[in-house]
Amino acid sequence: MRVRPHRKRPFRPSLSKSLSKTLSGIGNFSAGFDKAFDKVAKSLSLEEFRHDVVDGLSRPAKSIPCKYLYDEAGARLFDAICDLEEYYPTRTETAILRRNIREIAALLGPRCTLVEPGSGAGSKTRLLLDHLDSPEAYVPIDVADRQLLECSARLAADYPLLKVSPVCADYTHDFELPPLSFGSQRTIAVFLGSTIGNFEPQEAGEFLQRLARLCGNEGGLLIGVDLKKDPPILHRAYNDAQGVTAAFNLNLLGRINRDLAGRLEGSLFRHEAFYNERAGRIEMHLVSRLAQGIRIGSDEFLLAEGESIRTEHSYKYTRGEFLQLAADAGLEVKRCWTDQREWFSVHYLAPFQRDLPAQQGWKKSCVRPVPKESFLWGARFHRPTKSEVTKENL
Ligand code: AVI
């Protein structure tokens, strides 16, 4: 329950002007690194952070958007999660990429520009860059500005022929991209790590549409998707024995204290993550150990004992569900690779219609007619007909 009434402001900033910062050290990034770093503004303003936290805590079911888990400490903790024995997605996806890298490189084609929202530590990018035929440019996009710039500097040094153009932005909003006319043949969006699962299904569809527009008719999208599996495996992955995921979750409280003059006591919360089978998602929460009042600047909220703040959803898909999500966004699954246990999948998607003028991007008209509809997770999904589900794309 929220104690002090707070005036709700209509707050929908266009990040394209105010918050996203594009660096321009293309081609010689490492030399201008320090200067460039100074020039980068925080990609998420404190004002927006405060608004989202206050808004989320004012709701009957309290929540904070999961993007705020990734400050510098959060990004490092997430990297540590990726190395955990229990957290299978990173390992499994990397193995899929390694096993199929030649075929992937052939599909992506020569002289492409890679655009990678949420580029993080960028380790899988190197695997791609090592195998692609003369990649032209790499555009990593991330909110964790220091990590983004450090990785970009290292890549620029290691791949001297590659134009590296980092963009510090919250890719869940519209953001400004550097001109993508690097002389490359096509734009390929890379969205690995199953981050698509952190969007609500409807948002995931909208995000895929934006990526489709970004890539245009000649381009494509390489995306990693975590698959539905036995709940105990999922439970272990988000409740590791060393407590790294718990630290990652609880770190959000420290960030609120630091950036928003919050007064939250970490020891009064516990990490909780469970698989919600009906919704097909892992839910991560911070649960209050006792009834308490929490202050964030001048706002105060009451939490009952056991009441939780939801900090993340991580949706898991079947291959058919993801095929449908992509189809609704105007994208066709050209190829899908998976591991033997079918725990994880990597898809190569391309727009359905290849004859639209470049830059025109996705249009309603290029989505297949919807013969049947079903309702899953409250979002509209098109159930593919038999003829759409070919062996090749499943
Ligand atoms: C980034 N994302 C795909 C991770 C996931 O699995 O949903 C974030 C994460 N949260 C807890 N562990 C990992």
Image (cartoon, grey):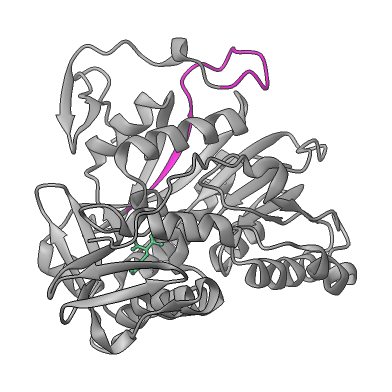
Q: Is residue 108 left or right of residue 179?
A: left
Residue at image position (57%, 28%) is 213
- Judge from the rendering whether residue 154 lies leftward or rightward of residue 210; answer left or right: right
**267 or 104, which lies in front?**
267
Q: Quadrant of ligand 1?
A: bottom left
Q: Position of residue 258 (x, y in %)?
A: 52, 79
Residue 33: percent from left, percent from top = 83, 71
Viewport quadrant of the C terminus: top left
In the rendered image, the quadrant that contains the N terminus is bottom left
Residue closest to the eye, 142 or 254: 254
Q: Which residues are magenta?
A: 345-361
Q: Is residue 350 magenta?
A: yes
Note whether 128 is above or below 323 in the view shown: below
Picture residue at 47% right of the left edge, 55% below the top? 51
Horizontally, is 131 left or right of 374 in the view?
right
> Which residue is found at the position 66% from the left and 13% from the top?
357
Q: Residue furthest front?
A: 4
Q: Quadrant of residue 147?
A: bottom right
Residue 176, visible in the rendered structure: no
Q: Is residue 330 magenta?
A: no
In this rendering, the count of numbered labels is 0
Which of these two is toward me, 324 or 274? 274
Query: From the viewer's perspective, is residue 69 above or below residue 184?
Result: below
- From the top left corner, tell me how far across and down residue 375 is, in percent: 16, 28
The answer to whether 49 appears left or right of 315 in the picture is right
Whether residue 21 is visible here, answered yes or no, is yes
Judge whether 361 appears above or below 113 on screen.
above
